[in-house]
Amino acid sequence: MVVQKPLPEPTWRSADNRARLYKGDSLEILERVPAESVDVIFADPPYFLSNGGSTCRAGKRTSVDKGAWDKSNGVEENHAFNHRWLSACQRALKPNGTMWVSGTGHVIYSVGYAMQQLGFKMLNEIVWEKPNPPPNLSCRYFTHATETLLWAAKSRKSRHVFNYDRMREMNDGKQMKTVWRLTAPGQKEKLLGRHPTQKPLALLERLLLASCPDNAQVLDPFNGSGTTGVAAVTLGHSYMGIDLEQEYIDLTQARLLDAVPSLRERPALQVVR
């Protein structure tokens, strides 16, 4: 029998233990997360786009290379990686838990196929439409203005949470559709630092409002700038984030404490009588 290793001590935790950050390899730490302990997972995995190309940012041509973690090792190895981390996430989800995965066409088809191989129940395909995308410099194809989010339950037996009334209320009393028009993160969300694939806070808030039970445990295995964590703790949930880079652990800590200053405070001692 294989004995699961316990989670290591967090690299950083809030005073009330509601937010925990782990520096290290996502796969290694994911496989040590207790089984059936997480309500909702959001993952923005590597897109494998760092190939020496460039894009336009603030009117200037800039490299799209994000780091060694985003370089492709070939279609087969990329898919094997996606299958492995998705399997680890599935094990960590509670029986009625759900997960969201964001990506472009470079990775999302592999993710969707791996989810089907693993027996996830596919719930929705959300299109995030960006009204302010960077221009297409080569003029050889259409401007990339969307990303896809897959929403899936742990298994076909899952009785997943969907806060339908809340979503309808947020959409002027109408059923919310699967195309979400939201601007990319502005300077206000990057005051403390930035990440090359940072998601807008409004996107994470919406998907967590849609799918979290009360007092949920939220996990992001590719933490980045910590937007998932900021959304989770401001909505009253607990958060666990994993990232390979200390720079982004530090950025997330700063953003969490800025968003919820009470995370600095130690909980009051309970007097036993």
Image: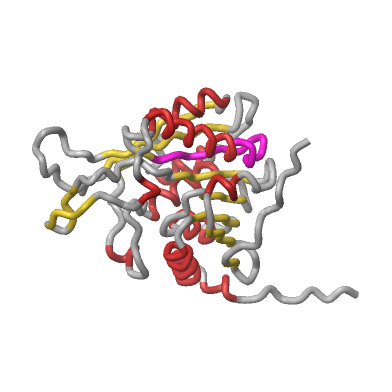
At 42% from the left and 34% from the top, the residue drawn is: 78
> Magenta segment: does it hold 144?
no
- Decide: is 265 above or below 105: below
Is 94 a magenta residue?
A: yes
Q: Can residue 70 be seen in the rendering of this structure?
A: yes
Q: In which image quadrant can residue 186 be found?
A: bottom left
Q: Nearer the viewer, residue 198 or 47?
A: 47
Left or right placement of residue 106 versus residue 228 in this view: left
Question: Residue 238 placed where, x, y %?
Answer: 60, 57
Q: Which residues are magenta?
A: 90-102
Residue at point 50% right, 71% down?
A: 257
Q: Does residue 177 appear in the picture of this structure?
A: no
Picture coordinates of residue 207, whole percent (x, y): 46, 44
Q: Position of residue 110 (x, y in %)?
A: 41, 29
Nearer to us in this view, 53 or 218? 53
- Seen in the picture, residue 83 relative to 102 is either above or below; the reply is above
Q: Quadrant of residue 50?
A: top left
Left or right: 65 in relation to 58: right
Residue 253 at x, y percent in the picture: 49, 67
Q: Is residue 44 above or below residue 247?
A: above
Predominant SS along the magenta part: strand
Tell me the residue at 55%/61% (across/down): 21
